[in-house]
Amino acid sequence: MLAFTFPGQGSQRPGMGRPWRGHDSWELVEEASEVTGRDIAALLLDADAEELRDTRHAQMTTFVSSLMVLDAVERLGIEPSFCAGHSLGEYSALVATGALSFEEGVRLVAERSDAMHEAGLASPGTMAAVLGLDDDLVEVACRRADADVWVANFNAPGQVVIAGAPAAVATASEITKELGAKKVLPLQVAGAFHTPYMTAARDRLRAAIAQAGPRDTEVPVVSNVDALAHHEGAEWASLLSAQLSSPVRWKHCLLSLAEAGVTGLVELGPGGVLTGMAKRTLEAARTISVSTPEELDKLIEWVGASAPVAPVALEGEHLFAVERLVVSPAAGVFSLGAGLAPGSQILVGTIIGVVGATEVRSPFAGRIEDFIAVEGERLTTHQPIAWLRTN
């Protein structure tokens, strides 16, 4: 089974939108700009590191970037069995599963980032990553500091983030070194996220979540708060609210995904940080990070290589283990690829045809058993096009 994972704040970087300018998925940037009244395109193309460090810009640009990548991946017909996101990434995961529409997600992220920015101004704080020390000992260090410092992220074995008042974080950092930490790295953030310092933002976020009204989904999202899979929309009001001031249990989310049978993790969005965490946590899992249009071809090959042993869940797939459907990545009139017919042998990435102006590339290698769509037919997104028998 396949899981999509989405990065959180801190993964943003200058110019991360440039590879996507002119791509069909760039339309999401324009839509987000209209919803928020902000020039998100300028932030994705021209903002420097200091401007992107602002919580409001960091969260919105990371969210929109992740959803652009998701949109491009969905056009390939690849879909997950589970989704999960690290902190802010949980909102991307909820949009990916349909619990929230893209517009609802944009509005929620705008409200969340504004509320967290104001909470950070009211209670200034910082964060630091502790490397090479057991979770329990990091918590001991926070208690021994006897001040406002807490564990904020359980990211991976030997990688824990602490947060709180700057002086308290400094004290706890020294104690972790005494207890055997290999290194402590201060993080360039604008607040003590996932600690009680964020409690002031919760009422504002609760009201926004209630207005959005998350929906039930078929694909579950594993929550940061309890590391459990949830598919009922009503549960997310309390989960997203609690997430603001409680630690992100990302390591536990990864373990839950593995226990559920997930064998492949696809990180969608800037940075590639979650892929590194997955490798540290789940030795047997296959991982890949997708952040640019050029990496979409690598994803097709990666999926194709795993298809015989770990088939990707595709919309409408009800075939045997060696059979697959290629589905439409867009809406429009279908044109058949040159020289293709039932019985043709194809490779991963072969162009099956064109829907509108969008190429339809096969995520699998094998033999075309038959075509489901016909030349000139108007297709909708995810409508089956061809039936394959994989090699």
Image: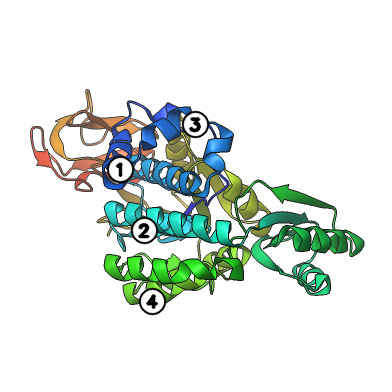
Q: Nearer the viewer, mark 2 or mark 1?
A: 1
Helix, strand or loop at mark 3: loop
* 3D distance between C-alphas at marks 2 and 1: 14 Å
For this rendering, which residue is in front, 148 or 172? 148
Label ID, residue 37: 1
User: Which residue is pictured at 37% across the width and 52% down the height?
Assistant: 322
Q: Which quadrant of the view contains residue 378?
A: top left
**CB atoms of marks 1 and 4 within 8 Å:** no
What x and y, as percent, mark residue 60?
A: 43, 46
Seen in the picture, residue 247 relative to 15 is either above or below; the reply is below
The type of residue carrying mark 4 is Glu
Dot 2 or dot 1: first in sequence order is: 1
**CB atoms of marks 2 and 1 within 8 Å:** no
Dot 4 or dot 3: first in sequence order is: 3
**CB atoms of marks 1 and 3 within 8 Å:** no
The type of residue carrying mark 3 is Ala
According to the picture, the residue beneath numbered tag 2 turns out to be 108
Q: Is residue 96 visible?
A: yes
According to the picture, the residue beneath numbered tag 4 turns out to be 235
According to the picture, the residue beneath numbered tag 3 turns out to be 47
User: Which residue is pictured at 80% across the width and 74% down the height?
Assistant: 146
* 3D distance between C-alphas at marks 2 and 4: 16 Å
Dot 1 or dot 4: first in sequence order is: 1
* 3D distance between C-alphas at marks 1 and 4: 30 Å
Q: Is residue 197 left or right of residue 242?
A: right
User: Which residue is pictured at 48% across the width and 56% down the height?
Assistant: 88
Q: Is residue 255 left or right of residue 31?
A: right
The extreme front residue here reads 122
The type of residue carrying mark 1 is Gly
